[in-house]
Structures are given as C-alpha cells and as structure tokens.
Amino acid sequence: MLKAIQLLAIFLMMVAFGFIINTNFRQKSYCILNSLLPNESKLVIRDNTNGMSSSFSANTILREGNGILFMETTDRMDPPSLVLCAIESAARVYPDRPVVFFMKGLENINTEEDEKRARQHFPTLSSYSNVYLFPLRMDQLLDETPLKPWFDKVNPEKEVYWTHVSSDACRFALMWKYGGIYMDADVISLHPIPQDHFLAAQDFTTTSSSVFGLSSHYQLAWRFMENFVENYRGEIWGHQGPGVFTRVVKKFCGMPVFTSTDDVMCGNISYFHPQRFYPISYPAWRRYFAVWQNLPTFNDSYALHLWNFMNKEGKSMVTGSNTLVEHLYQKQCPITYGYILTNEKTHL
C-alpha cells in the first residue's frame, strides 16, 4: 500500500513538472519570436480559455499584403456616393481580398466589434464582409519614413492644396507599410487587375498617382517618398502626386513609349497603357455625366477614374438620367445605387 502511494506521488510530481516546463517553453518561444519582429508586427497571443480575443487592426487585416486601399484625409464622415460606389465596386471585383477604407475622422478601432459598429454607419458597405474601416493617423503612418521630417515641419494652414498633398504623402506610406493596390476614392473598379506590381500611365507623358500596386516595403515606394520630400512644391497642383511618379519613372527607366494599346515594362514592373484606367481623359471628364447613344464597353479597362477634382460644378449621379455614370452605378455598385433610389422615393 505504501509503495502504491509513493508511486502515485512520483507520477503527480512528474505531471506537474511537465506542465511547468511546457508553460515556460511557450513563454520563452513567444518572447524569442517577438524579439525577431519589428514593433508594428509584435504578436498578441491569447489563451482561448480565458475568453480573450486576438488583436484586431489594419496590420492584422492587411498582413498578407493583398489589400485594396482607399483613404479619406479630411474629417468628413459622410462620403459622397462616388466614394461609396468606388469602395463597393472594389469589394465586388475583389471578393477574396480585404478592401480597407482609412478615414481621418474615424475614432480608434481596437476590436473587431469596434470596426463592425463603425461600418454600420455606412449601410451600403456593411453587407460586404471584405470591407473594413480603420482610422487614418498621419503622424503614426509617416513615422519611420522619409516623410516624417517633412510632416513635422509643414504648416497645413499655409498649404494651398493640403488635402491633396497630405493624400499624396499617405498613399506612399500606406503602400510602403501594407502593400497591395492603392486607389483614389473616385476610381470605379470594373475587372480584377492581373498584376500586383504595376504603375499606370495617365497619358503618354504622365504617370498616374490614382492607382498603383506594390508589395510592402518595396524599394520603389521608398524612392517615391524621398522624391516627394526632395522636390517638395506644395503650391503646384499635382507636383507631389503624378509629379513624383513621373519624375521617378523618368529617372529609373525613361518615359515608357506605347506603340499600341499593349502594356510595357518599367524595369521589372508593369507599366499600364492609359486605356486601363483613363479611357476618358481629364479634359473630357464631363462625358461621364453625359447620355451616350452607344454605351462604351471599356473592355480594355480595369477601372475608371472619374476625375472628381475636375468636377467643380458638383455634378453627381442622378437616377433616371440615363447618363454613363448612372449605368456604371447600376452595374458596378448596385447597393449604393439602390440606396440612392430608395432615398429619393422616400423624400418624394
């Protein structure tokens, strides 16, 4: 009997010892792994038995580097229908990729529940499971980039185009940090873009800043940021956006020449023909708000840039107008279109 009790005690001691060793191993492994990661990538490990959930942030959602990125650099929290249409169209065209809308006016998002509550304020987007909203904090976003010293010194109140130059800066930093595809919020998606690394021609002499794709920490994005700071002229419209892209492209591969509607290469990056995003050029932007006898197919385009900056007249999509933009809404962002239609009927 005594021998049996001794054996049981030894067994219990071995079990307890094994548990302690396993716990220490897990903690040490976690510390070692975290020491090898940059601060922004530190892991948060939760024990499911205590009911705590894993961390939830843009880093988590965009960790695979395949996101579609949009942003709002003002405090505006009631985006116009064109912005909602752009985001919805991307969510439909890229159902297996996260579509993230960074908003300066958004409160901090710390949990998945916070993000879901924020998305509920945008009923046309809340039904898409691949759409996410996160706050845009410029000081944090630009930290540890060539843009941070510029941001610390610049005075927004003295900038003629602050909304636009801050947007230019943020798109470079977003691409550097997360990678994926960046799109301006007046770009309506039509078809999936087949390349992950690309730049696009706005016309035959200018490189677009409205749509581009790179991996995170891709060296070209760093060079964009350096050029932004070295050649800063915020008082010149476009100098910090398409101007940066065009200057860098010219420096590293010359201005690409198109001899057909085929795309060309800039180094090892695809350089898209203007037809891919700009089949209607900016001087003709009103054609989007016109009635066409024969609707264009846009078979050679992946998305359409609607040149919202040019729209000083405040033109918008009007239901029943039979304009090109109405047809685009109906096909590419039907929930946004239906919401507008319902609201119009409600207010009759």
Image (cartoon, rainbow, N blue to C red):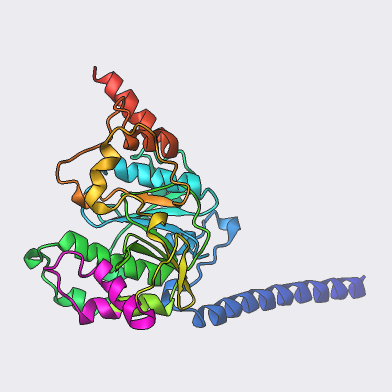
Q: Residue at x 27, y 67 (%)?
A: 242
Q: Image quadrant of residue 110?
A: bottom left
Q: Residue at x 30, y 48 (%)?
A: 306
Q: Nearer the viewer, residue 334 or 258?
A: 258
| 218 on left or right of 3 | left
Q: Residue furthest left?
A: 158
Percent across and percent down for residue 133 are 38, 51
Location of the C terminus by quadrant is: top left
Count how many numbered circles sit on residues in the image.
Answer: 0
Bounds of the magenta segment: 226-254
Q: Residue at x 35, y 54 (%)?
A: 278
Q: Is residue 220 above or below residue 76?
A: below
Q: Residue furthest top?
A: 348
Is residue 252 shown in magenta?
Answer: yes
Percent across and percent down for residue 90 are 44, 48
Q: Residue at x 33, y 37 (%)?
A: 325
Percent across and percent down for residue 285 are 25, 47
| 155 on left or right of 301 | left
| 143 on left or right of 256 | left
Q: Could one spot residue 324 in this view of the protein?
A: yes
